[in-house]
Amino acid sequence: MLRAVLAFGVKSGWIEKAPHIERPRADPSRQRWLTHEEADLLLDACVANHVKLFVNLGIKTGARVGAILELTWDRVSFDKDIIFYPIPGKNHGKKRRAIVPISPDLRKELKVAQEFAQTDWVIEYNGKPIKSVSEGFNTARKRAGIDHCTIHDLRHTCATWQIAKGISTTKVARMLGDTERMIEKVYGHHAPDYLKEAANALDW
């Protein structure tokens, strides 16, 4: 922020030259994903239906928070069992949104939600779309006795489970709307055959 202010000062002619401001080192990345047991506990702890549906979508599609909250029923195809997270005509920038398949269990959850829907939005509460599920999520997380878990960790969980099941990084990348390189870098070590061939080559 300080660098941006100084740059603006130079551009506006308030100062001749901005001093060098060294960027602080980025914090080491933190990875957290839910076990299957934790996921069950979290879903059971979701009292509000919209929070439970959000958690299901987060784990079973890997979509980001904004994509889930902005999802409308016209982009949920039960005929093709596909969710279209991209909003037509909208540029989502670097945070790309994927077109993902609907699993059988998620299909059941979505069907029930659609039956009682009062708006065009998939995640709604009291007949209105909502901007945040943070409070409901944290309440459920605490009720389930799960520590150090954020909403974004639902996305980590989706990727980790898939890689651990032997799903290729190519498919996981397409599912999450990320690059294969990023998936390999962040989640590759969860693969059941991770570097085994390389390690076995060291035996003699």
Image (cartoon, rainbow, N blue to C red):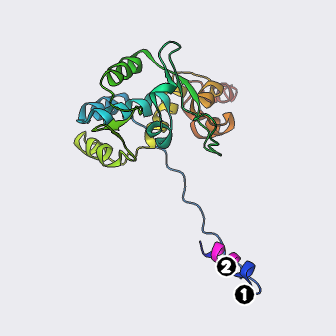
* Whether residue 101 can be seen here: yes
Residue 161 at x, y percent in the picture: 48, 28
Q: How many marks?
A: 2
Residue 96 at x, y percent in the picture: 62, 39
Is 45 on the left or on the right of 170, as rendered? left
Residue 169 at x, y percent in the picture: 63, 28
Query: Going from the N terminus, do you reach mark 2 or mark 1 first?
Result: 2
Q: How crowded is mark 2: few (under 14 residues within 10 Å), some or many (20 or more)?
A: some
Is 3 on the left or on the right of 38, as rendered? right
Disc sitting over residue 6 in the figure: 2
Nearer to me, 144 or 35: 144
View extreme (right): residue: 16
Disc sitting over residue 15 in the figure: 1
- Residue 140: which quarter of the image? top left
Q: Residue 6: say if magenta.
A: yes
Q: Quadrant of the N terminus?
A: bottom right
Secondary structure at badge 1 equals loop
Q: In this view, does 95 lie above or below 184?
A: below
> Which residue does the image show at 22% across and 35% down from the upper left?
47
> Which residue does the image show at 38% across and 22% down from the upper left?
110
Nearer to me, 117 or 203: 117
* Whether residue 35 can be seen here: no
Distance in Å between CA atoms under marks 2 and 1: 8 Å
Decide: marks 2, 1 in contact (CB < 8 A)?
yes
**Most common secondary structure along the magenta stretch:** helix
- Residue 144: which quarter of the image? top left
Q: Specify the segment rendered in magenta.
A: 3-8
Amino acid type, mark 1? Ile
Amino acid type, mark 2? Leu
